[in-house]
Image (cartoon, rainbow, N blue to C red):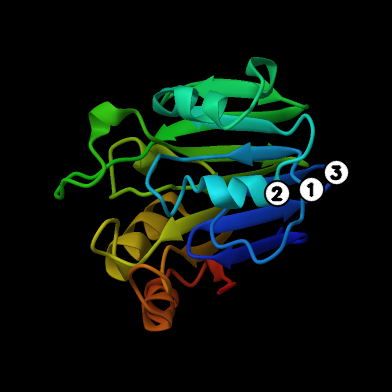
């Protein structure tokens, strides 16, 4: 289920299958210019980084962003035909890939207000449902997620901590869980280890950072 998938750092994920897909590219090390599709969860600098987008975009790269980011990606030089605007709680299809948007927000801290319309994504690739949670706490919406693989933030401060992330994973019961959002801005490798140790025995876990 993780074939061709890398967590490059923090919440930056690369999926290389038929298409090359990036989610929240950040601190990209080289000029790859190989992205077919880029998905952005929200506009904080560690998730929407124009410097890193420029390292991976190529001609006709499609960028998928919450509505709040439309003007920014137009100024960045993306043609309107290559921009997909998404809202929470919707379903889309692009290049044969199904996409669902799950609201991503804080419930007990101020950093990611629900009203900003930021999202996590479920990507259906080769029949496998990948949930990339974005910066979020446990919410009524993400407790209803059905997925095979869940990428969940564990670093705390701005998102769930390891205990909360494990609680969410144990509730939605993916086949596999992958901790993200640690090791750069907040959180440490120990948070990922703690997350693994708190998971239900039915859930396989991979630490990719």
Q: Disc 1 and disc 3: Cα gap in Å?
A: 12 Å
* Residue 67, placed above or below residue 145: above
Q: Residue at x 43, y 34 (%)?
A: 102
Left/right of residue 71 with respect to residue 55 in the rendered view: left
| Label 2 sits on residue | 56
1 vs 3, front mark: 1
Q: Is residue 189 left or right of residue 110?
A: right
From this view, report whether residue 82 is shown above or below residue 172.
Answer: above
Judged left or right of residue 132, residue 44 is left
- Asked if the residues shown at circle 2 and circle 1 are in contact, with their CB atoms under 8 angstroms apart, the answer is yes
Query: Few, some or many C-alpha atoms within 10 Å of disc 1 (few <14, some 14-19, many ≥20)?
Result: some
- Residue sitting farthest toward the top: 81
On the image, the x and y values in percent for residue 135 come to: 36, 49
Residue at the image point whose x is 70% and y is 37% from the top: 37
Image quadrant occupied by the C terminus:
bottom right
> Which image quadrant is residue 191 in?
bottom left
Considering the numbered disc 2 on the image, is that residue within a helix, a strand or a loop? helix
Name which residue lies at 59% across and 72% down.
208
Circle 2 packing at 10 Å, graded few (<14), some (14-19), many (20+), is: many
Name the foreground residue: 103 vs 182. Answer: 182
Question: What residue does disc 1 label?
Answer: 34
Which residue corresponds to mark 3? Answer: 18
Marks 2/1: CA distance? 6 Å
* Marks 1 and 3, the one that precedes in the sequence: 3
Q: Is residue 32 visible?
A: yes
Q: CA distance from mark 3 to mark 2?
A: 16 Å
Residue 153, quarter of the rendered image: bottom left
């Amino acid at each position: 289920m993780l074939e061709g998938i890398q967590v490059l750092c923090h919440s930056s994920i690369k999926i290389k299958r038929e298409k090359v897909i990036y989610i929240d590219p950040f601190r990209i090390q080289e000029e790859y210019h190989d992205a077919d599709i880029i998905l952005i969860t929200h506009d904080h600098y560690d998730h929407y980084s124009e410097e890193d987008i420029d390292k991976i975009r190529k001609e006709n790269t499609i960028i998928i962003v919450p509505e709040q980011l439309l003007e920014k990606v137009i100024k960045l030089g993306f043609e309107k035909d290559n921009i997909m605007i998404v809202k929470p709680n919707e379903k889309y299809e692009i290049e044969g890939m199904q996409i669902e948007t799950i609201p991503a927000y804080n419930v007990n801290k101020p950093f990611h207000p629900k009203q900003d319309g930021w999202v996590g994504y479920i990507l259906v690739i080769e029949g496998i449902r990948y949930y990339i949670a974005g910066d979020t706490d446990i919410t009524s919406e993400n407790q209803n997620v059905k997925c095979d693989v869940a990428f969940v933030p564990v670093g705390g401060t701005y998102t769930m901590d390891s205990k909360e992330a494990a609680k969410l994973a144990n509730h939605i019961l993916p086949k596999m869980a992958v901790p993200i959002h640690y090791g750069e801005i907040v959180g440490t490798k120990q948070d990922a280890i703690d997350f693994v140790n708190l998971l239900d025995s039915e859930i396989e876990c991979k630490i990719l950072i």
